[in-house]
Image (tube, rainbow, N blue to C red):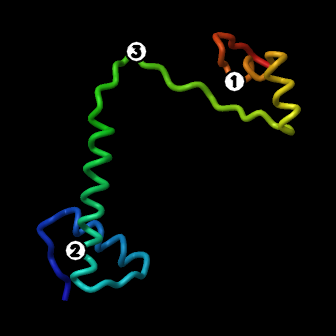
Amino acid sequence: MTQTHDNPLESYVRAALALQGYTFDDAEMAEIVLQFARLEAVARTVFEWPLPCAAEPAPVFRPVIGSAADIAQQIAAGHAQRRLGIGGVSGAD
């Protein structure tokens, strides 16, 4: 017999866990649902943050590859700053 749950989050959590083959007793399931509710509250805070239409995406991260000495030399020469778009200098390779 299929159990019905009034809480859509609980229904989602139960279905997601069942699809992955997990089984939990009711006390464990209540704790898991509580944790998902907390995660949902954190996510809602992020998604509800006002973001102006003029906001631009963050620059692309391009890691600097090499030894620590090589990286230090590149920074001193300004190459890494241009690659990373930091220090008010941006440009292509």
CB of mark 3 within 8 Å of CB of mark 1?
A: no
Which residue does the image show at 81% across and 37% down from the upper left? 65
Mark 1 vs mark 2, CA separation in Å: 46 Å
Q: Mark 2, residues whose alpha carbon is within 10 Å: few (<14), some, or many (≥20)?
A: some
Q: Is residue 35 above or below residue 49?
A: below
For the residue marked with disc 1, what is the amino acid? Leu
Q: Position of residue 10 (x, y in %)?
A: 22, 68
The CA distance from mark 2 to mark 3 is 42 Å
Q: Secondary structure at mark 2?
A: helix
Q: CA distance from mark 3 to mark 1?
A: 22 Å
**Residue shown at 84% from the left, 24% from the top:** 74
Residue 2: image x %, image y %?
20, 83
The residue at which mark 2 appears reads as 30
**Nearer to us in this view, 2 or 7:** 7
Q: Which mark is residue 54?
A: 3
Q: Residue 5 sits in which quadrant?
A: bottom left
Badge number at residue 58: none
Location of the N terminus (image quadrant): bottom left
**Which residue is under mark 1?**
84
Residue farthest bottom in this picture: 1
User: 18 or 58, which is in the foreground?
Assistant: 58
Q: Are marks 2 and 3 in contact (CB under 8 Å)?
A: no
Q: Nearer the viewer, residue 15 or 67?
A: 67
Q: In the visual, does 88 lie left or right of 82?
A: left
Amino acid on which the number 3 mark rests in the picture: Ala
Q: Is residue 47 above or below residue 3?
A: above
